[in-house]
Image (cartoon, coloured by chain):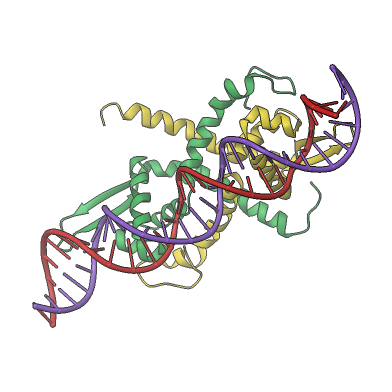
Chain colours: A green, B yellow, C red, D purple
Amino acid sequence: MCPEKPSNSKCPAEHNSGECSKQLLPVRDALDMLNGKWKIPIIIALTFGNYRFKELHRQIGITPKMLSKELKELEMHQLVKRTVYDTTPVSVEYELTPYAASLRNVIDALRDWGTQHRKRLMGKSKTA
Amino acid sequence: MCPEKPSNSKCPAEHNSGECSKQLLPVRDALDMLNGKWKIPIIIALTFGNYRFKELHRQIGITPKMLSKELKELEMHQLVKRTVYDTTPVSVEYELTPYAASLRNVIDALRDWGTQHRKRLMGKSKTA
DNA sequence: CAATCTGGTATCCTTCGGGAAACCGATATA
DNA sequence: TATATCGGTTTCCCGAAGGATACCAGATTG
């Protein structure tokens, strides 16, 4: 996967410089998007519907500071849309963008592997 | 953080009780396995073949402390096998277990999404 | 005898993620 | 006037993550 050119068993000098780091980068990008304590909980919560700030705050149990920061990041990455309604106590709704659906595959892959891995470690280890 | 008891507000019934935590835990598991600065670089490096400690240290540019810690974790999770050879300066080889191949789907999903996401943000940010 | 190789440890120190709590301006209610 | 709600922001603080460096024991080489 990583090297397209160096194909001997001992990845030589090319490893860190060329192809490898280019393959590493997108994986890093995706991980950074999902990393942290709250990204996944927020995304999953939003799959259940649109929510207002305080609702997310109370439901997920996240502090306003973190929630604000995470939502901004998600918005910058076009995964979440923020809508302000001119109601009397102003209300703000957050919803997943259609683009956010593209994360489905990733989250599913993570969930499937995680499920199977937990079973493997818990159950009897049938050798590696 | 999605506790197990039903909760206060408008969160659809599934959110706090069943579905949410069932999704959250395995995703968290998988993410924890790949998180950190070095897990993916090490795994990718090891796909090239077996590596000795100092080789990994030099190729990846990781400090011995971190490398030692990460390899132990990977070994505990049955993703890496450690073999000590009774050569003169003792040599230790690390290799991916067959089980580690199960991460392919996950890493591929991450890489594909990351690749596409980077293109998307680059392309669209020209004016916006 | 000193130096160098091996696979690591131990120690110190800085950075960063994240929690707790107070606070903000605008509005509504009592 | 006092209190509450809304969506946040600001400040302080702590523990975890990770880097730099020194060090270890055993064996070979100079």
Q: Residue at x 69, y 20 (%)?
A: A12
Q: Does residue A69 lie above or below A22 as drawn?
A: below
Q: Quadrant of the C terminus of chain B?
A: top left
| Number of marks in the rendered image | 0
Q: Residue B32: x and y, percent?
A: 58, 50
Residue C6 placement, left or right of D20: right
Residue B109 placement, left or right of B45: left
Q: Foreground: A112 or A92?
A: A92
Q: Foreground: B37 or A51?
A: B37
Q: Foreground: B58 or A50?
A: B58
Q: Residue B88: x and y, percent?
A: 89, 31
Residue B107 placement, left or right of B126: right
Residue A24 placement, left or right of B120: right
Q: Residue at x 40, y 58 (%)?
A: A48
Q: Residue at x 74, y 23 (%)?
A: A10
| Residue B70 image-quadrant placement | top right
Q: Foreground: B42 or A34?
A: B42
